[in-house]
């Protein structure tokens, strides 16, 4: 019950579970209108839970109380009601039983048709920006036929219920016959409409032909560098952060994914995207032209690509931090490990996990280019502080996140600061996914920030500011609506009904569209920050605005040990990091390079005044020089640019792969030309 979701879902779940006993009781009594009311409650509660994709629906199916069973039980209770109302010996009773059994029997061919259509339209791959014109992929069936098809089919029994109830109330059996006939006729009609979609011309080519088409495209495109990624849909940010970098590389880049649910989460890119869920299909693809494979995460499915010897394998990660994940011993499996700066190299040396110094290459962090450098003074009349805690992690180490022990203290002190401060709260997207305590703290912090924002609305100073900015904010909100509508149009979101196969067929690279999308996103970001006051506290939990946009809007940051801290250092702005594990400032700095120029917070967060002083007055900031030195140590030099360093590393490693492959071919040729051993005995 705790996992049902919202309060409204919990209420619907209770009504559903209590509704069925009430339906049975009403049929036994019998009470027609009590029966009608109870049936209506179960229908509405069931429908609501399905629309919300409630966890309870899944659980009911696991305990053999799935959707079709619930409908069958209702129909059986309708038959019971008829019997108890004195119709057991009348023709209408037998017709009702026969029609409902026939209707239930039609569920099997209906389910089989829908399943077959879905399976045949599920290609062995999903793609973006890849020409599949030589592979037959017809339009998808109308979404009304396939989406939630079981619910649509089962709900046709409503006509039977209405007809039988009216017949009982009026004594005119013709209403029952009409309702029952309509249910069966509509069910047969549903099957008739589905049937043409099973014709060969309406189904995509076979998996073998699709894979052959992908191999033909690979031979034509001949990708040279690949970004390989596997993970849950919630981890899509880990691949999205590399899309722009991949687009800027020389050669012919390719994004290679392993899970279908990542594809819809991808950001806009013109780089070809190939998703191959099946390991066998992957192993049979022609990837002979790829020379460098880049890995953004250490996951089990990496082994499927690491087995290929003709390419060099590089771990690039999805952030540079002092977390243990940044020195994972699995990194030994790669030919090279690329870090942002010298700190990454030293981190591996200190960890002594078997990654050799000669296998580490410092390439900077190309993603940090959008981060603006600090001007030395607040952007607005009052400073803005970003609180961006990381998530609770996979274990219960108190140093994982500041949320549990310090989060509320940090937020309270910022909201109640002697000098006004604006707070932006942007938690990690995984927050609360493992530990319910973290979710509870996050919800309390959200409530605190929203309450403080509402309180500012009535304060005289902010009322005056709001009045002076009202017109500009209204214009910004109108601009947001315009931009969002255009972005939806460009992304194809306005076109409904396309399934994955159709998306793969139609999603083609369009440089003009990509350029317009990038421009619109910049305009969206500017309009977003103008749409509310620079004094208004804000909770930001979605992907937009991006974390780096929040960096640019902030004058200082509070965070935890994560790549967020290393990235924020690129701005040169003051920052604070929480020592939630209570190591003490000296030990905390010794263990974590990125905090050496930070204000170190205890769980009480009493040290926040130091950060606020540095944010408000550059001359009162004793750590500015240390931050500048730490920036180069962590992230590398400003020149050459990170993207230039990264591209040069790709080209150098590709050359090594070419040399290795040429050497193997030469050795094989030499072996073929060498005479075999003489088996003649020596004597």
Image: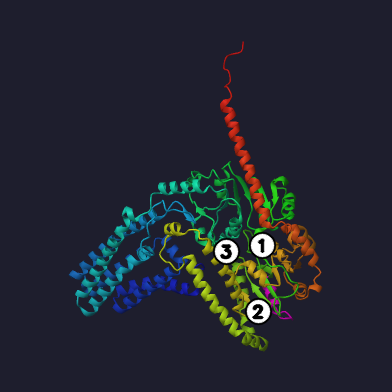
Residue 46 on image: x %, y % = 40, 70
Please tell me in which quadrant of the rendered image residue 560 appears.
bottom right
Residue 62 shows in the view? yes
Is the Cβ of the residue at disc 2 closer than 8 Å to that at disc 3?
no
- What's the magenta region? 407-421
SS for callout 3:
loop
The residue at 27%/67% (across/down) is 186
The residue at 46%/52% (across/down) is 125
SS for callout 2:
loop
Which of the two labelled residues, at mark 2 and mark 1, occupies the earlier sequence position? 1
Distance of label 3 from label 1 (alpha carbons): 27 Å
Which circle, 2 or 3, is nearer the viewer? 2
Q: Is residue 74 above or below residue 251?
A: below
The residue closer to the viewer here, 374 or 147, is 374
Which circle, 3 or 1, is nearer the viewer? 1
Q: Which residue is mark 2?
A: 534
Q: Which residue is mark 1?
A: 368
Instruction: In the rendered structure, find residue 433 and report the number of the disc placed on it.
Output: 3
Which circle, 2 or 1, is nearer the viewer? 1
Which of the two labelled residues, at mark 3 and mark 1, occupies the earlier sequence position? 1
Residue 334 shows in the view? no
Distance of label 2 from label 1 (alpha carbons): 24 Å
Please tell me in which quadrant of the rendered image residue 517 appears.
bottom right
């Amino acid at each position: 019950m705790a996992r049902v979701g919202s309060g409204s879902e919990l209420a619907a779940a209770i009504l559903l579970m209590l509704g069925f006993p009430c339906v049975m009781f009403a049929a036994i009594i019998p009470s027609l209108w009590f029966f009608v009311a109870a049936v209506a409650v179960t229908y509405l509660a069931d429908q609501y839970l399905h629309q919300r994709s409630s966890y309870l629906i899944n659980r009911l199916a696991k305990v053999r109380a799935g959707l079709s069973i619930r409908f069958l039980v209702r129909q059986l209770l309708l038959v019971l009601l008829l019997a108890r109302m004195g119709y057991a010996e009348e023709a209408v009773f037998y017709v009702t039983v026969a029609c409902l059994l026939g209707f239930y029997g039609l569920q099997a061919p209906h389910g089989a048709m829908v399943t077959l259509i879905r399976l045949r339209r599920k290609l062995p791959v999903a793609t973006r920006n890849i020409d599949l014109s030589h592979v037959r992929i017809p339009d998808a069936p109308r979404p009304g036929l396939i989406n939630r098809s079981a619910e649509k089919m089962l709900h046709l029994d409503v006509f039977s219920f209405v007809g039988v109830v009216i017949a009982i109330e009026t004594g005119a059996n013709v209403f029952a016959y009409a309702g029952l006939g309509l249910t069966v006729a509509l069910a047969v009609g549903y099957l008739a409409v589905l049937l043409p979609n099973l014709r060969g011309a309406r189904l995509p080519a076979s998996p073998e032909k699709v894979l052959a088409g992908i191999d033909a495209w690979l031979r034509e495109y001949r990708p040279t560098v690949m970004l390989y990624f596997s993970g849950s849909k919630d981890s899509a940010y880990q691949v999205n952060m590399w899309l722009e970098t991949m687009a800027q590389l020389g050669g012919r880049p390719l994004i290679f994914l392993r899970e279908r649910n990542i594809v819809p989460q991808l950001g806009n890119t013109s780089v070809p995207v190939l998703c191959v869920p099946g390991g066998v299909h992957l192993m049979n693809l022609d990837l002979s032209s790829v020379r460098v494979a880049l890995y953004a995460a250490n996951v089990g499915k990496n082994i499927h690509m690491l087995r290929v010897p003709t390419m060099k394998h590089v771990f690039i990660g999805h952030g540079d931090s002092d977390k243990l994940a940044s020195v994972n011993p699995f990194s030994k499996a790669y030919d090279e490990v690329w870090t942002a700066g010298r700190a990454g190299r030293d981190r591996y040396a200190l960890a002594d996990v078997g990654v050799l110094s000669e296998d580490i290459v410092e390439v900077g962090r190309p993603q940090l280019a959008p981060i603006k450098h600090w001007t030395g003074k607040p952007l607005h009349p009052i400073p803005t502080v970003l609180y961006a805690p990381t998530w609770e992690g996979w274990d219960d180490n108190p140093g994982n996140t500041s949320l549990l022990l310090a989060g509320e203290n940090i937020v309270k002190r910022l909201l109640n600061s002697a000098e006004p401060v604006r707070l932006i709260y942007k938690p990690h997207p995984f927050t609360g996914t493992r530990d319910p305590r973290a979710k509870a703290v996050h919800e309390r912090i959200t409530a605190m920030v929203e309450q403080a924002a509402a309180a500012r609305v009535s304060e005289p100073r902010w009322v005056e500011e709001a009045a002076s900015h009202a017109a500009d904010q209204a214009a910004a909100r109108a601009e947001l609506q315009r931009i969002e509508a255009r972005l939806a149009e460009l992304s194809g979101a306005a076109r409904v009904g396309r399934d994955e196969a159709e998306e793969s067929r139609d999603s083609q690279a369009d440089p003009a569209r990509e350029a317009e999308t990038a421009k619109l996103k910049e305009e969206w970001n500017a309009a977003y920050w103008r749409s509310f006051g620079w004094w208004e506290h804000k909770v930001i939990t979605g992907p937009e605005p991006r974390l780096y946009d929040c960096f640019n809007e902030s004058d200082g940051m509070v965070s935890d040990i994560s790549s967020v801290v290393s990235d924020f250092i690129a701005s040169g702005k003051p920052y604070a990091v929480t020592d939630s594990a209570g190591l003490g400032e000296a030990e905390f700095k010794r263990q974590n390079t990125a905090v050496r120029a930070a204000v170190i917070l205890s769980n009480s967060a009493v040290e926040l005044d130091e950060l606020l002083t540095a944010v408000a007055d550059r001359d009162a900031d004793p750590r500015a020089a240390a931050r500048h030195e730490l920036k180069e140590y962590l992230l590398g030099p400003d020149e050459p640019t990170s993207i230039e360093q990264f591209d040069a590393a790709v080209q150098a490693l590709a050359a090594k792969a070419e040399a290795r492959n040429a050497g193997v071919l030469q050795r094989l040729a030499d072996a073929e030309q060498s005479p075999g051993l003489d088996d003649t005995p020596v004597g």
